[in-house]
Amino acid sequence: MNQLLTPYVTERALGLLDGPRWRPLEDALATFVADLRARPVDEEAGEDAAARTYLLRLATAGLLEWVVPSAYGGAELEEGHAGGLSSTAICLIRQWLARESGALDTAFVMQGLGSYPLALAASEPLRRYVLPRVASGATVCAFALTEPEAGSDVKNLRTTATPAEGGVVLEGTKCFISNAGLADSYVVFAREAGEGKPRFSAFFVAGDAPGLSVIRTRVLAPHPIGTVKLERVFVPDAHRVGEPGAGLKLALGNLDVFRVSVGAAALGLADRALAETVGHLKRRVQFGKPLAEQQGLQFALADLATEQLAAQLLVYRAAAARDAGHATSEMAAMAKMHATESAQRAIDRAVQSFGGLGVTVGQVPERLYREIRALRIYEGATEVQKLVIARALLDERG
Ligand SMILES: Cc1cc2nc3c(=O)[nH]c(=O)nc-3n(C[C@H](O)[C@H](O)[C@H](O)COP(=O)(O)OP(=O)(O)OC[C@H]3O[C@@H](n4cnc5c(N)ncnc54)[C@H](O)[C@@H]3O)c2cc1C
């Protein structure tokens, strides 16, 4: 049990997956976390201020370099990493950060989710301009795909890109966009007029582009998010990301890389829940002895610890497969689904174990309870992951 609760992921789950190689990154994360605990960021001061402080600290610790390919100021990777990013590193970082704060994890991952399409397909000058700034935290990123009529059904996008002299004009509404209003760089997906099937394309839009406006919304846990309105936003040809019609492939490819890491963030939240639960059960005395001595509660702990390790193996297996260039969509889907669903159960158990304290504002289980919920919805809700897994199974068998 003690080993399950040690913070070093590589010692617990990555023994099978070349764990010792990741020890230097985990040491850097341990230093980062120790510093954060010594000098906590005041999230009450506001989502945007907290996000900017987190980004500065992550950049100073060199952690943002892991979401940018090395040619543009990112971390040097060993040979053979598919796509120029290491999914394993991103997962490790998210697991460590999410143990401390969901807002910190969001600040980190949005730099990757919002910039990786640029790394893959933007023009060379645009990459050279934006990506080093992403690694230094100077440019804040957003990924704008979801729309009021296009959530799980991404092909139902209504935002249009209409040809104009020297570029296109974007018109439409994006919703649930993380970093809306905070971002300097948006990757926007839109439908382009053309013969035959609808063509979806991607565009870089600066945060201060004329015609872009934001209405902030609030979700359960601190998370900068909002609706982005695009009213006659002109995008020059040089800011196109990829070929016309290649947008959907780019969006889904981006999500395929980052979806596994949502599972890793869930692992971090569940790690914290399990550690808090064990600590509380040992401390809290009822009926003349610590709750930890009640066999019914011990059984619950045993189930959670087992589920947690299984989730960890799924996540790091999917990440390692992607890094080696033989990932499949269903591997990522299984990892994301199982890790987020089992984390929800672990956190619910933490709340239950704390009793009234579990729902008291300011207690860790209460915060985790709010932080985990959205992970089962974004980057493909659990039901959508099931569709991906079932389709793969049926195609293979068929
Ligand atoms: C905190 C947060 C941050 C987000 N950040 C971003 C971001 O940065 N950029 C971005 O583009 N989007 C972002 N999103 C949007 C997110 O990706 C969508 O909310 C998600 O894809 C689900 O879409 P929806 O909300 O429209 O739900 P819907 O698609 O309306 O789904 C509603 C429910 O129906 C289920 N469902 C849908 N279709 C099926 C089906 N065929 N079979 C069975 N069940 C089905 C879903 O699983 C879900 O449970 C974010 C969302 C949240 C909550």
Image (spheres, rainbow, N blue to C red):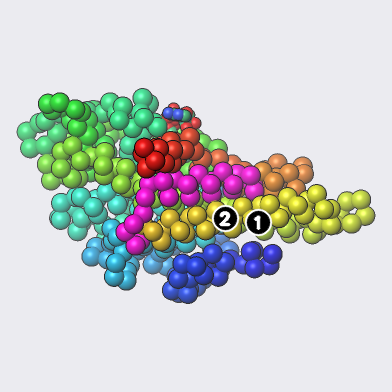
Q: Residue at coordinates 32% horizontally, 71% vertically from top-left?
A: 78
Q: Residue at coordinates 18% horizontally, 45% vertically from top-left?
A: 242
Residue 218 picture location, percent across and down? 49, 35
Q: Nearer the viewer, residue 47 or 101?
A: 101
Disc 1 element: helix
**Which quadrant contains ligand 1?**
top left
Residue of label 2: 310
User: As drawn, is 138 to the left or to the right of 241?
Assistant: right
Task: Report how far apart the C-alphas of labels 1 and 2 lie in the structure.
Answer: 9 Å
Label 2 packing within 10 angstroms: few (<14), some (14-19), many (20+): some
Residue 222, relative to residue 127: is it above or below? above
Residue 383 picture location, percent across and down? 48, 35
Q: Quadrant of the C terminus?
A: top left
- Mark closest to the chain's N terminus, 1 or 2: 1
Q: Which residues are magenta?
A: 323-347
Question: Looking at the picture, which amino acid does disc 1 mark?
Answer: Ala
- Is residue 205 visible from the viewing direction of this image? no
Please state the total of marks drawn on the protein image.
2
Residue 374 picture location, percent across and down? 51, 40
Question: Looking at the picture, which amino acid does disc 2 mark?
Answer: Ala
User: As drawn, is 177 to the left or to the right of 157?
Assistant: right
Residue of label 1: 305
Q: Is residue 329 magenta?
A: yes
Residue 192 picture location, percent across and down? 18, 30
Residue 11, relative to residue 179: is it above or below? below
Disc 2 element: helix
Q: Name the chief secondary structure element in magenta.
A: helix
Label 1 packing within 10 angstroms: few (<14), some (14-19), many (20+): some
